[in-house]
Amino acid sequence: MTLAPHDSQQPNHTQQLPDMSRTQEIPAASGPTAPPPPPFPSAPAYESAGAPAPRRGRGLAQTAGVALIAAVLASGGTYALTQANEPSTGTTAATQQPSQNGTSPTVIQGNAAAPDWSAVAKAVSPSVVSIQLANGAGSGVILDKSGHIVTNNHVVEAGGNGSGNGGIQVTLADGRTFAATVVGTDPSTDLAVIKLSAAPNDLTPISLGDSDTIAVGDPTMAIGNPLGLSGTVTTGIVSAIDRPVSTGSENDSPFGQGQGSAEPVVTNAIQTSAAINPGNSGGALVNAKGELIGINSSIAQLGGGNGGQSGNIGIGFAIPVNEAKSIADQLIASGKAEHAFLGISARDTVTQDGAAKRAGAEIAAVTNSAPAQAAGIKQGDIVVAIDGESVDSSTALVAQIRERKAGEKVTLTIIRDGKRQDVSVTLAARPSSS
């Protein structure tokens, strides 16, 4: 399989994906009074063109690591809205709870096993925008009343950072279009913030969820601008969490045109079965309450393409909202983002772990005076977990570090000389590259 990016006028990134057979998909349970609903669909039922549990055990659905996936999104798809039939009891009706700070309302579902997706779409759609550039299109999510919008860096890069040929044009859900400028970009996380040049006073920022509380099997809705079809919604479930996804370097991107960083984009992503297509890049992945849980960024595709676009196969990826919000806040404040730094290079390996063997990330080199060296990490150590969360590849190690903040203390579980041990490390801020 391969993964692909999304821009209606740009070729997709495609690269091979490893076996994803370990991904767990758990259907939602039926409510106590409603008759059992049909299995939750991984694709919409019909189409037309036009209080969470604490999240831990992130490695539950993690595979041996998604290898390089050159897969950035920026335009394409179909409109599809799935709504479960109400049982005779009428318990599936949803209500909206207005927010106190002007953000999109929270949807209170009458039956969590059969979400009212019409109510979710109505609540969230005003907070999702379509982005048009000279060389492509994408999606974005309104963050505040000032007109700040978070999207993918590759969407902005598709238009040369919005310079020339009309720059960036943003269309709201009600059809109004405004010019926008780039506030800041962060190629290493594939995130960017733009701002409306003359923001109206009736913007509806999206309500934020908590990506640390989502679980495999939770229902999801993706909203965006696939193939220029603005306001498209699709539904599915959380197929996996903490899926290490690498989309290659900015120089590999057909959108970056060799202008970006040579550093790979690595994400500890949310995997979803909600249909994501070219143009959904930068759009919203929300839960059944209508809260933002991720920024859609890439999809998996079957191999054999020659640079042309292809669509959803039920494997899409989103940047978790907690990471996206942290980066966006920094870009708004200073135009740049700070990243956590461990100070090692690593490679994939398989090692003996008691009576079994285990995949992990072998330390190939340790940077002088870096946090890893200060903590006693040595070349040849094999990292198999961070804070109890499985690490089964070098990509997974990078993804775990990237979602954390400078100054954060983490516990690395390593295997050294055949024995497990825990090492506490305080992450530093990554040095600026010259």
Image (tube, rainbow, N blue to C red):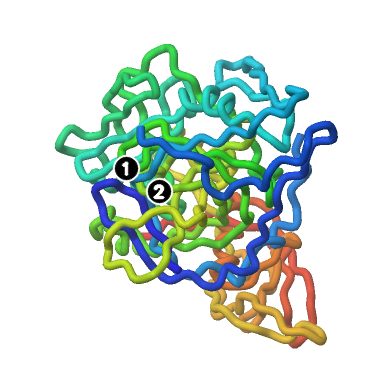
Q: Residue at x 64, y 46 (%)?
A: 40
Viewer can see residue 331: no
> Which residue is identified by label 1?
227
Q: Residue at x 44, y 59 (%)?
A: 265
User: Image height check: is 42 above or below 367?
Assistant: above
Q: Is residue 248 left or right of residue 164?
A: right
Q: CA distance from mark 2 to mark 1?
A: 8 Å
User: Image height check: is 375 above or below 347?
Assistant: above
Q: Label 2 amino acid?
A: Asn
Q: Quadrant of the C terminus?
A: bottom left
Q: Quadrant of the N terminus?
A: bottom left
> Could you say where residue 394 lies in the image, as x and y percent from the top left?
56, 72
**Mark 2: few/some/many CA within 10 Å (<14, 14-19, 20+):** many
Please name whichever residue, 264 or 3, is drawn nearer the observer in this view of the structure: 3
Kindly state the secondary structure of the residue where label 2 is placed: loop
Going from N to C along the chain, the mark reached first, 2 or 1, is: 1
> Could you say where residue 285 lies in the image, as x and y percent from the top left?
53, 40
Please name whichever residue, 407 or 181, is drawn nearer the observer in this view of the structure: 181
> Could you say where residue 302 lies in the image, as x and y percent from the top left?
42, 66
Q: Residue at x 74, y 48 (%)?
A: 55
Identify the image quadrant of residue 68. bottom left
> Which residue is identified by label 2?
277
Kindly state the secondary structure of the residue where label 1 is placed: helix
Q: Label 1 amino acid?
A: Leu
> Could you say where residue 199 lies in the image, as x and y percent from the top left?
36, 18
Q: Which residue of the protein is positioned furthest toward the left in this rendering?
A: 165
Q: Which residue of the protein is positioned furthest toward the front in this rendering?
A: 88
Q: Residue at x 59, y 66 (%)?
A: 397
Do labels 2 and 1 touch, CB within 8 Å? Answer: yes
Identify the image quadrant of residue 220. top right
Q: Is residue 92 left or right of residue 130?
A: right
